[in-house]
Amino acid sequence: MDMRDDVLDDREVVLAACKQDGRALRYASAALKGDREVVLAACTQFGRALIYASPALKGDREVVLAACNQEGSALRYASAALQDDREVVLAACNQEGSALRY
Protein backbone atom coordinates (compact mmCIF):
# COMPACT_ATOMS: atom_id res chain seq x y z
CA MET A 1 0.00 0.00 0.00
CA ASP A 2 1.47 3.35 -1.00
CA MET A 3 0.87 6.72 0.66
CA ARG A 4 -2.08 7.54 -1.62
CA ASP A 5 -3.81 4.30 -0.62
CA ASP A 6 -3.20 5.15 3.02
CA VAL A 7 -4.88 8.54 2.57
CA LEU A 8 -7.86 7.02 0.74
CA ASP A 9 -8.32 4.64 3.67
CA ASP A 10 -7.87 7.33 6.33
CA ARG A 11 -11.34 7.84 7.81
CA GLU A 12 -10.66 11.34 9.15
CA VAL A 13 -9.28 12.58 5.83
CA VAL A 14 -12.04 11.02 3.72
CA LEU A 15 -14.79 12.22 6.07
CA ALA A 16 -13.44 15.79 5.88
CA ALA A 17 -13.28 15.59 2.09
CA CYS A 18 -16.82 14.20 1.80
CA LYS A 19 -18.22 16.94 4.03
CA GLN A 20 -16.76 19.51 1.62
CA ASP A 21 -17.56 17.67 -1.62
CA GLY A 22 -19.61 14.49 -1.59
CA ARG A 23 -18.08 13.42 -4.89
CA ALA A 24 -14.89 12.65 -2.94
CA LEU A 25 -16.53 9.39 -1.91
CA ARG A 26 -15.62 8.10 -5.36
CA TYR A 27 -11.96 7.93 -4.35
CA ALA A 28 -12.43 6.44 -0.89
CA SER A 29 -11.35 2.91 -0.09
CA ALA A 30 -13.95 0.15 -0.33
CA ALA A 31 -14.03 -0.03 3.45
CA LEU A 32 -14.94 3.66 3.76
CA LYS A 33 -17.58 3.36 1.04
CA GLY A 34 -19.22 1.06 3.56
CA ASP A 35 -18.80 3.43 6.51
CA ARG A 36 -22.23 4.83 7.32
CA GLU A 37 -21.04 8.18 8.69
CA VAL A 38 -18.74 8.84 5.72
CA VAL A 39 -21.41 7.91 3.17
CA LEU A 40 -24.09 9.90 4.98
CA ALA A 41 -21.83 12.98 4.96
CA ALA A 42 -21.15 12.55 1.25
CA CYS A 43 -24.81 12.02 0.33
CA THR A 44 -25.95 14.98 2.42
CA GLN A 45 -23.55 17.18 0.49
CA PHE A 46 -24.00 15.58 -2.97
CA GLY A 47 -26.95 13.23 -3.32
CA ARG A 48 -25.64 11.29 -6.29
CA ALA A 49 -22.63 10.22 -4.21
CA LEU A 50 -24.95 7.33 -3.34
CA ILE A 51 -23.67 5.64 -6.51
CA TYR A 52 -20.32 5.05 -4.75
CA ALA A 53 -21.82 3.67 -1.52
CA SER A 54 -21.62 0.01 -0.63
CA PRO A 55 -24.65 -2.11 -1.56
CA ALA A 56 -25.61 -2.32 2.11
CA LEU A 57 -25.75 1.46 2.44
CA LYS A 58 -27.75 1.81 -0.77
CA GLY A 59 -30.35 -0.07 1.24
CA ASP A 60 -30.03 2.13 4.34
CA ARG A 61 -33.17 4.24 4.55
CA GLU A 62 -31.59 7.20 6.34
CA VAL A 63 -28.69 7.38 3.89
CA VAL A 64 -30.98 7.13 0.87
CA LEU A 65 -33.37 9.75 2.29
CA ALA A 66 -30.45 12.13 2.82
CA ALA A 67 -29.32 11.58 -0.75
CA CYS A 68 -32.82 12.02 -2.21
CA ASN A 69 -33.50 15.13 -0.13
CA GLN A 70 -30.34 16.64 -1.60
CA GLU A 71 -30.88 15.44 -5.16
CA GLY A 72 -33.96 13.55 -6.27
CA SER A 73 -32.20 11.67 -9.04
CA ALA A 74 -30.16 9.84 -6.39
CA LEU A 75 -33.18 7.54 -6.16
CA ARG A 76 -31.83 5.62 -9.15
CA TYR A 77 -28.90 4.37 -7.01
CA ALA A 78 -31.02 3.19 -4.08
CA SER A 79 -31.80 -0.45 -3.46
CA ALA A 80 -34.86 -1.85 -5.23
CA ALA A 81 -36.69 -2.04 -1.91
CA LEU A 82 -36.13 1.66 -1.21
CA GLN A 83 -37.07 2.62 -4.76
CA ASP A 84 -40.48 1.20 -3.84
CA ASP A 85 -40.63 2.98 -0.47
CA ARG A 86 -43.31 5.68 -0.59
CA GLU A 87 -41.53 8.11 1.75
CA VAL A 88 -38.24 7.80 -0.14
CA VAL A 89 -39.93 8.29 -3.51
CA LEU A 90 -41.87 11.28 -2.15
CA ALA A 91 -38.66 12.88 -0.85
CA ALA A 92 -37.00 12.38 -4.22
CA CYS A 93 -39.99 13.79 -6.12
CA ASN A 94 -40.28 16.78 -3.79
CA GLN A 95 -36.71 17.64 -4.67
CA GLU A 96 -36.89 16.74 -8.37
CA GLY A 97 -40.16 15.78 -10.02
CA SER A 98 -38.52 13.74 -12.75
CA ALA A 99 -37.21 11.33 -10.06
CA LEU A 100 -40.54 9.56 -10.46
CA ARG A 101 -39.07 7.68 -13.43
CA TYR A 102 -36.78 5.69 -11.13
Image: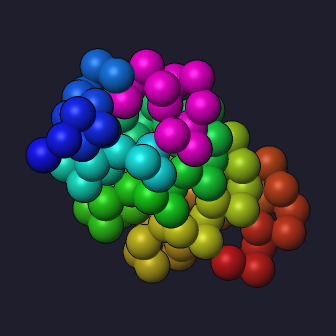
x and y percent of residue 42 in the render? 50, 37
Assign the C terminus to one quadrant of the image: bottom right
Nearer to me, 58 or 100: 58
In x, y percent, where is residue 66? 55, 41
Q: Residue at x 72, y 49 (%)?
A: 71
The chief SS type of the magenta part is helix
Is residue 88 positioned above or below 20 on the image?
Answer: below
In which image quadrant can residue 40 be found? top left
Left or right, 14 with respect to 43, comes to left
Q: Is residue 91 left or right of residue 99?
A: left
The residue drawn where x is 39% and y is 56% is 53
| Left or right: 94, with 59 as reference point | right
Nearer to us in this view, 13 or 97: 13
Q: Can you say whether 40 is above or below 84 in the image?
A: above
The image shows residue 4 at horizontal and vertical percentages of 30, 38
Where is residue 3 shown, x and y percent of the image? 23, 34
| Residue occupying the point 31% across, 60% down | 54
| Residue at horizontal 42 percent and vertical 72 percent from the top | 79
- Residue 30 located within the stretch drawn in magenta: no
State the residue in front, 66 or 8.
Answer: 8
Is 97 displayed left or right of 22 in the figure?
right
Please tell me in which quadrant of the rendered image residue 25 appears: top left
Residue, far left? 1
Can see residue 13? yes
- Occupied quadrant, residue 100: bottom right
Residue at far right of view: 97
Q: Outermost residue toward the front?
A: 2
Which residues are drawn in magenta? 14-24
Establish if 71 lies above or below 21. below
Q: Nearer the viewer, residue 2 or 12?
A: 2
